[in-house]
Amino acid sequence: MNEQRARGDAPSQGRRGRESRRAARLASAASAPAGNLKRRIPTYDLLGEEDLLRIEDAAETILQEIGIEFRNDASALALWRDAGADIDGERVRLPRGLARKLCGTAPREFTQLARNPERNVVMGGDNVIFAPAYGSPFVQDMDEGRRYGSLEDFRNFVRLAYLSPNIHHSGGTVCEPVDIPVSKRHLDMVLAHLTFSDKPLLGGVTGPDRATDCIDMCRIVFGAETTERDCVILGNVNVNSPLVYDGTVTMVMRAYAAANQGVIVTPFILGGAMGPVTNAGAIAQAHAETMAGIAFTQLVRPGAPAVYGNFLSSMALRSGAPTFGTPEPALGSLVVGQLARRLGLPLRCSGAFTTSKATDAQAMNESAMSMLAAIHCGANYILHSAGWLEGGLSMGYEKFMLDADFLGSLAVYLGGLRVDDATLALDAFREVGPGYHFFGCAHTMAHFETAFWDSALSDNLSFEQWRDGGGWDAEMRANAAWRKALADYAPPPIDPATAEALDAFVAKRKESLPDAWY
Amino acid sequence: MNEQRARGDAPSQGRRGRESRRAARLASAASAPAGNLKRRIPTYDLLGEEDLLRIEDAAETILQEIGIEFRNDASALALWRDAGADIDGERVRLPRGLARKLCGTAPREFTQLARNPERNVVMGGDNVIFAPAYGSPFVQDMDEGRRYGSLEDFRNFVRLAYLSPNIHHSGGTVCEPVDIPVSKRHLDMVLAHLTFSDKPLLGGVTGPDRATDCIDMCRIVFGAETTERDCVILGNVNVNSPLVYDGTVTMVMRAYAAANQGVIVTPFILGGAMGPVTNAGAIAQAHAETMAGIAFTQLVRPGAPAVYGNFLSSMALRSGAPTFGTPEPALGSLVVGQLARRLGLPLRCSGAFTTSKATDAQAMNESAMSMLAAIHCGANYILHSAGWLEGGLSMGYEKFMLDADFLGSLAVYLGGLRVDDATLALDAFREVGPGYHFFGCAHTMAHFETAFWDSALSDNLSFEQWRDGGGWDAEMRANAAWRKALADYAPPPIDPATAEALDAFVAKRKESLPDAWY
């Protein structure tokens, strides 16, 4: 870390004053409304009590009769044995109700600290947090097309998420920086999150030592005492569905939970492949897998923060290819939301899903279908809220901007509809009367500035204005928007000693680690 | 009407046999599942009892204190006077509760007959009906761009709606055929609906004589007795918001209601222009306007079928331009749905709204936001379900196909999620066990064919397959799809005597009508 980077790569001392003024202005412009959103609309509850009980019962049957394999981690098996599970080789069968009981020590709600305290977020309850897409090996934009992601792409998406007022969380692997060895990648990724942004973040999950590195970097930023007491980082782990937790996953979960940091436990189920082809069964399986995982974090450290994760999707039956943004997982999300609330756990859901390769009509149609299910199901943490393309294989610059803009619309939607004297506006009717317009009336003047969501990227002009302005489609406008955002970007301030300590930590760890690509 | 048209413009007798076999095949392939959809998911109820009562109370205050103007129709004023309203010039003030009470004689549910009885639809209850967009002067496609709509465009959209298995209703003015004088346009439009399709339809609303012509044409098809007894046509009328019904509108309403045909009463409110800039007030106004209109149909003929219409949208505050697919009207629709159910009336809502000029990411994002609100609010009849672009000024061929495809996804969504032994699939878990995939298991084999929605237009292929196949975006695929659909189109069979009688009616009416362009 050096000063230049902290000041937006300002090329000369002479520009520093102007740069830092601009940085201050942009830093405040970049601010999301402090922390996360609050949901002021009801959840959309799809199923009734009887159906929910049947799914919960099926999940208990799966845990009791079929069981879950905890592979390659003897310590995990020992924890389960001590908790009263039936251990048969690596197969762990749980007496009915055990997983649910163990989940009871996880907090219903917890705060994740951000480097900038104004950006702390609360997981659980009525809180809603949007985070970028996660994990794609490829990136794409209109100018350079599709290519492997690099560290510079990674930093760009961290910058763009920082700049978006609609994104509350910096996320984790916003794209894979494939130019960095896997063994060192987590260091550069967490360093980028901690320096190019001041929003909360996810840490590495590809191995327990890497998870520990990420937590250690947070100790530098937040202090060891705070890190012991509060959640400052979370790991988002996937179950090796169906019904398997591999040792890498459980050891990573143990690293986070033991340090009192958060674990998001997310089954990874494409119906017909890693789970049954019917929704109810896939949901029962997901519920069993998630409960077992969260129960496991509580065996490691009762009270450690944990999040109930959801990742269901479907399959194209002609080709076997995964599909996203389809109606079945949308319905599934609604049910998963009900199950998570009945367990009393914060819920992670997925957002802007699509299989489209282009930032086109299909992409935003599927994304909207998927996002609205996440909104309606009561999700607290919505991963993959921006950028996702191609079933998660690619992170799109233009897609990111369009998704992030749509999040602004969803924030308004989540705010609900206020009914009071001011909004009922009877005086406006008295003033205007039948047949006249409301443009200039006192009520309109008093309320118009905040009345309607104002999209940064939608074009509402007339056809003629639009055509004469170049006839740009949404993707072209998004292209201009991310280019301008990155050109104007300035990083949030950071204490120079902290920045130096982070740089030193990364340098030292990199020295001691081999270059490995797995 | 001639035989050639009935056989798909087959150019020669020699091709007739083949053509009619193809027609028979396509006619059955074109079938939507008989009639309309059934909703098997709950409505999404946004507001609680107290807020709903406040809005209903505000609507009653508007009707009682401000009143509604019924202009240029002395008969309308007389009906209101006899019903106990306070008449002051053209201003009609209704005692609290009068409009609601009058709405009570409208049927909660009614059937609209289609020329093909398998396509009859039920308005109200749990029924959902998708109809194309309505009223645009322009059409557009990728090849020829944007232009005024013609009768041939009109017929094309009737053909495409007929061919779509996801569209249940032929709609009304699917585009304005501006090459035909307004005074005669209704004849060609209704003729096209009745011959190029066999799905139910909307009739003309630009004048009472024109409405009567449309009803008379239905009498030819359905018989006078059936038309007196059953709903065979509906007129979709807009209130001259705020708080005005012009004489043209009320005379058209009288024509339909007197013939025992349906009226859809739809306020037209862009918040800040034709109503207050705040949602609650705009909804109260809409509720007042709709109740007054439906009450009026019941004064004309108690028991006449009527539909509670909803058309709310917002405004771009920088330009004053209307906006669509934004969060405020989505919330508004949810509340309007609650109000319509409390009145016990079938609900019409609007679907695939957007201001986009292109069939791009913005178009389908806004459309999905708007459509899902219509789905969640419990709408029975969703107008503008396919084709809408540019705030309703343009009907897009490619947009139509993408919207119609999305309707298939929404049909699955409306089907809900079944929980039973077959869908919980415990035997599949017993068969597969942890760590194995479900591709070939007995449960997957038994269920995969019907498990997942299969989009006709989404591309789920890998990037490489997609790129090597030409790298088409959604708009390009939609372009190929509508061209193929129209090339393959064959009209549904019609009794030749009926076709001749319709043609004769149209010819005779055209002779007696002047060419007028208003």
Image: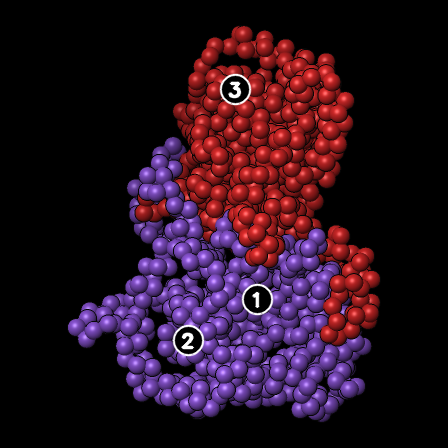
Chain colours: A red, B purple
Do the numbered discs 3 and 1 sit on residues whose CB atoms are within 8 Å?
no
Q: How many labels does the image show?
A: 3
Q: Which residue is drawn at 76% across and 52% down?
A: A449
Amino acid carrying mark 3 in the image:
Arg
Amino acid carrying mark 1 in the image:
Cys
Instruction: Name which of mark 2 and mark 1 comes first in the sequence.
Output: 2
Disc 3 from disc 2: Cα separation? 62 Å
> Which quadrant, please, contains the N terminus of chain A?
top right
On whether disc 3 and disc 2 are found on a single subunit, the reply is no
Q: Residue furthest left?
A: B14
Q: Name the residue under label 2.
A: B193
- Element type at marker 3? helix
Q: Nearer the viewer, mark 2 or mark 1?
A: 2
In front of the other: A388 or B464: B464
Q: Residue at x 65, y 51 (%)?
A: A413
Amino acid carrying mark 2 in the image:
His
Q: Name the residue under label 3.
A: A185
Do the numbered discs 3 and 2 sit on residues whose CB atoms are within 8 Å?
no
Rendered location of residue A230, percent (x, y) = 70, 26
Dot 3 crowding, Cα within 10 Å, few <14, some 14–19, many 20+: many
Rendered location of residue A436, percent (x, y) = 75, 71
Residue B349: numbered disc: 1
Subunit of label 2: B
